[in-house]
Amino acid sequence: MAASLGRLLHSSGNLLRNGARLKCQPLHTAARALCSNTSGGLTTIRPKDEVMKNQLTVFGEYVAECLPKYVQTVQVTAQNELEVLIAPEGVVPVLSFLKDHHNAQFGSLADIACVDIPTKPYRFELVYILMSLTYNSRIRVRTYTDEITPVESCYSVFKAADWYEREAWDMYGVYFSNHPDLRRILTDYGFEGHPFRKDFPLSGYVEIRYDNELKRIVQEPVELAQEFRKFDISSTWETFPAHRQGSKPLMDTQGRGHEAPPEETPAEEKK
Amino acid sequence: MAVAKDPHLALRVLYTKTLAALEKLPKDAAYRQHTEGIINDRFDLVKTVPNVAELEQKINCGQIEQVIIQAEAELSLARKMADWKAWEPLVSEAPEGQWKWP
């Protein structure tokens, strides 16, 4: 399969992507036809593009094949978005590959996002979003880290990473090694803490006011006029029905859990 | 971007250097096989097609100056790949539940 894939991809260098560019036109007409609702079909559902999905899957497998040392998984989302999940040691190699290789050419770093999920073993998830102008496609590269493990900076690959990584450091506390100038970028000069973390409160810890006696701004612990009210906003409907775990109980409107209905065995019933 | 003075020569030099850099990778590395295929195809086109406009058409990847930039990028990548040894098996697995969503 690998050999045939190679032949397919390097026969013209961009046989893989030509179809993607051509596909743009039929997609518009198909969407317009659906939106007109002539025959009472679904109007606002995006038509499933199997061709695009197949192309993305093929390219994802190609990337995984070329970089087996770092790529842990590759997935294509329902919206036809390719995601490459890598080990944190491989940030610079994978991004260099995606930028320089002929079949990839993702020359533009659109964003470096960070996701904080405190329950996970490595709580921060770094998301690099790359764009290819020659092939008109996007790709996401995801890694993980925690508060103390540094990640290699990709400033050597993409100069745009300079400020994106400064933002990730300032807001989350993700440390980047070999970064030219890692300092705060959005928070105030003496600000302590990393605001976008899930354990940082919405109001913050300090508030500032102008003190007439001292004739300058002072920072004092924040005082809210009303004490913080937490509402238990649990929806009446089950969220994420596709990700239901077998033993997980379903909730009712008051947020009380029900046990899963006991499995009925015919033998016991008859008794 | 300045017009390339002698694109055929530039591409010939870059492609030979890239193929030499790829020789350092193991023969069964997927990256080496795919890249050698691409480079050899383009190299053949560069050797057989003397006219620049026709060469651009045949390669079908933008202007010849862009093709030269791509070749330079691939050369630097091939050299770095030898250091990283990216063909080895996975260096570290994700911990349990790291990629679970939601």
Image (cartoon, rainbow, N blue to C red):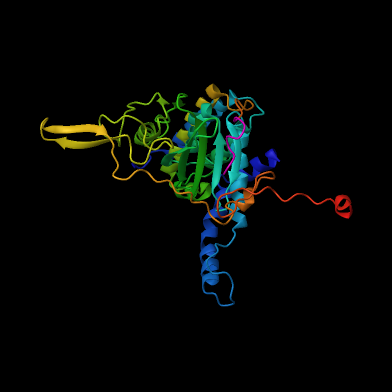
| Residue B41 in view | yes
| A220 to A262, vertically: above or below | above
The residue under the point 62% across, 56% down is A50
Q: Quadrant of residue A69?
A: top right
Q: In the rendered image, which quarter contains the C terminus of chain B?
A: top right
Q: In the rendered image, which quarter contains the N terminus of chain B?
A: top left
Q: Nearer the viewer, residue A144 or A261?
A: A261
Pinpoint residue B48: horizontal percent, then vertical percent. Answer: 55, 42
First to last magenta residue range? B94-102
| Residue A10 in view | no
Q: Is residue B80 left or right of residue A176?
A: right
Pinpoint residue A175: horizontal percent, then vertical percent. Answer: 41, 27
| B38 to A235, vertically: above or below | above
Q: Quadrant of residue A216?
A: top left
The residue under the point 50% across, 37% down is A117
Prevailing SS of the magenta stretch: loop
